[in-house]
Amino acid sequence: MKKFRALWIMFGLVALIQVTLGLVIYFELPNWDARNSFGGMFGAINTLFTGLAFCGVIYTIVLQSKELELQREELKLTRDELSNQRGELHRAAEAQAKQAELMFQTAKINAASARLEVAATMYVKNKNIPKSYNMNESHDSRNALADAYNDLMRLYRGKND
């Protein structure tokens, strides 16, 4: 209601003026012929205000047309921006997938390096490497070192599993 407060005030003022003028004319002019003559004096002014109102309506239509054109341009720019964002999101997703692949490769290389380090340590200490939790089975540390080295080199060259 606060948005339209000024509009309601103007409407009330116009209605009050109309009623006041109607009562003044009714009580001041003695008969209908005098009232008719008085009203006829304002015919030209009435035509003028009607023409101005019509011009106002046409001007409003022109303004709305311009506003609609601006809105269409803004919508086109918004669509273009969304299209650009979609492309950027697609490129970001591809980069993220590549990064995940590289991180996976890095983890495999780190695991192979750790395996090589354990095999080298066992070889230096001249101990065998257990195959599993069963300590009765073991690998020769020299063979384990060679296997770990070969796995690491295969990963570095990009021939991974």
Image (cartoon, rainbow, N blue to C red):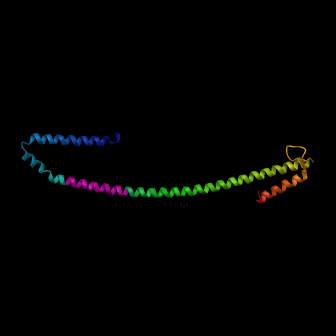
**Is the residue 151 above or below the residue 17 in the image?**
below
Residue at the farthest right position = 126
Q: Is residue 35 left or right of residue 160?
A: left
Residue located at (24% from left, 53% from top): 53
Position of 91 relative to 35 (above/below): below
**Magenta span: helix, strand or loop, mainly?**
helix
Q: What stretch is highlighted in magenta?
A: 48-66
Q: In this view, does 82 lie to the left or right of 37?
A: right
User: Measuring 22% from the left and 55% from the top, which residue is drawn there?
Assistant: 51
Quadrant occupied by the N terminus: top left
Q: In which quarter of the image is the C terminus?
A: bottom right
Name the residue rendered at 19%, 54% in the picture.
Answer: 48
Tell me which corner region of the image, top left, top right, bottom left or bottom right, holds residue 93: bottom right
**Number of numbered discs overlaid on the protein picture:** 0
Q: Which of 80 and 10 is in front in this view?
A: 80
Q: Is residue 146 magenta?
A: no
- Who's the residue at 41% across and 55% down the image? 71
Q: Position of residue 30 (x, y in %)?
A: 6, 42
Q: Where is residue 121 in the image (x, y as percent from the top left)?
A: 88, 48
Q: Where's residue 19, x and y in %?
A: 18, 41
